[in-house]
Amino acid sequence: MAWLVLILSGCMESVWAVALSKSEGFSQVGPTVVFALAMLASMLGLAYAVKTLPIGVAYAVWTGIGVVGAATFSMVTGSESASLMKILLLAGLVACIAGLRVVEG
C-alpha cells in the first residue's frame, strides 16, 4: 500500500509543480489553489509512505516521478521543447526509479 500511495503522491508532485509555474507568482487564483491542494496531498502521501519505506528510496522515487511527470506534461503541451535526448534521459530516470522499487521490494 505504501508504494501505491508513494506513486500517487509523486504524481501530485507533478501537478503542484506545473500549477506553480501556471500561478505566475501566486497571482492566478485557480492555479494557486491547485498548487496548494496538490502539494498538501503530495506531502501527506510522502509522509504516509515513509512510515514503512526508507526515506532515501521514498524521496528518490517521489521526486523522480515528479520530475518525469512535470517534464513530460511540459513537452506534450509545448511549454518546453522535446528532444530525443530529453526523452532518453527521462526514460533512464524511469528505469532507475523502477530499479529502486525492485531492489527495495
Image (cartoon, rainbow, N blue to C red):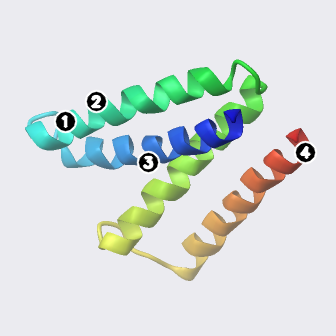
Chain-order first, disc 4 or disc 2: 2
On the image, numbered disc 1 is attached to which residue? 32
Labelled pair 1, 2 in contact (Cβ < 8 Å): yes
On the image, numbered disc 2 is attached to which residue? 36
Across and down, in percent, residue 76 comes to 38, 73
On the image, numbered disc 3 is attached to which residue? 14
Q: How many discs appear?
A: 4
Q: Nearer the viewer, residue 65 or 8?
A: 8
Q: Amino acid at mark 4?
A: Val
Chain-order first, disc 3 or disc 2: 3
Q: Identify the disc placed on residue 103.
A: 4
Label 4 to label 1: alpha-carbon separation? 37 Å
Quadrant hosting residue 75? bottom left
Label 1 to label 2: alpha-carbon separation? 6 Å
Location of residue 87 with respect to 5 vertically, above or below: below
Q: Amino acid at mark 1?
A: Thr
Labelled pair 3, 2 in contact (Cβ < 8 Å): no
Number of other residues with Cα within 10 Å of mark 3, as a class: few under 14, some 14 to 19, many 20 or more: many
Outermost residue, front side: 1
Residue at 52% x, 51% y is: 67
Q: Amino acid at mark 3?
A: Ser
Number of other residues with Cα within 10 Å of mark 1, as a class: few under 14, some 14 to 19, many 20 or more: many
Label 3 to label 2: alpha-carbon separation? 13 Å
Across and down, in percent, residue 64 comes to 61, 47
User: Secondary structure under badge 1?
Assistant: helix
Residue 40 is left or right of residue 94, and the answer is left
Outermost residue, bottom side: 84
